[in-house]
Amino acid sequence: MNHPTVRQATRVDLTGIEQLLESASLPTLGVSEHIRHFLVAEMEGEIAGAIGLEVYGETALLRSAVVASGLQRTGIGGLLYAQIVEQAKRLAVQRLILLTNTAEKYFERKGFKKIDQKSVTGPITSSVEFTGACPSHVACMELLL
């Protein structure tokens, strides 16, 4: 297997990212508005994974962490995660928030702690993930950088 290349996403990647998210039953709303803070993992010219940030000052929403189904458990997700955390730090983000229905254990291993979604305040709460794209029963987690 070739090694993935991680790079900054562009508008050209939007359709591929959305298709990957849809195949994993993840929301696509809001991706286009925040594409400048997305990364993609590419293998053989195809998008193998993606991850993104919605930046709201010192707080950012970590979203759309996805790896193509046949490539899961190959390290692509960890590679994307490590690089998006570095990007968040370069952007002076101090707090990462995420909402997940399926990856709570994965993000616990990365240092995220489960928090009450109602405790999250500020502009991040206007994100489409907070205003309805994610079901209300999902886990809300945070990581302080």
Image: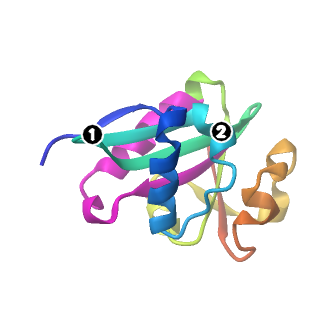
Which of the 4 image quarters holds residue 93? top right
Assign a secondary structure to mark 2.
Answer: helix
Crowd rating for badge 2 (residues with CA inside 10 Å; few <14, some 14–19, many 20+): few
Q: Which circle marks residue 78 in the picture?
A: none
For the record, the magenta segment spans 61-88
Assign a secondary structure to mark 1.
Answer: loop
The answer for how far apart the CA atoms under marks 2 and 1 are is 22 Å
Q: Nearer the viewer, mark 2 or mark 1?
A: 1
Q: Say how the picture is coloured.
A: rainbow
Residue 132 x, y percent position in the rendering = 78, 66
In the rendered image, which residue does mark 2 sit on?
Answer: 34
Taking depth in this image into account, of 57 and 8 the one nearest to the observer is 8
* Amino acid at circle 2: His
Crowd rating for badge 1 (residues with CA inside 10 Å; few <14, some 14–19, many 20+): few
Image marks 2 and 1: residues in contact by CB distance under 8 Å:
no
**The stretch drawn in magenta includes residue 73:** yes
Q: Is residue 123 left or right of residue 78?
A: right
Task: Look at the image and tell me whether residue 54 can be seen.
Answer: no
**Residue at the image position 72 percent from the left and 64 percent from the top:** 133
**The stretch drawn in magenta includes residue 70:** yes
Vertical placement of residue 141 versus 1, above or below: below
Task: Look at the image and tell me whether residue 18 can be seen.
Answer: yes
Taking depth in this image into account, of 128 and 14 the one nearest to the observer is 14
Residue 3 x, y percent position in the rendering = 19, 40
Residue most extreme to the bottom: 137
In the rendered image, which residue does mark 1 sit on?
Answer: 45
Taking depth in this image into account, of 72 and 90 the one nearest to the observer is 72
Vertical placement of residue 134 versus 121, above or below: below
**Residue at the image position 86 percent from the left and 50 percent from the top:** 121
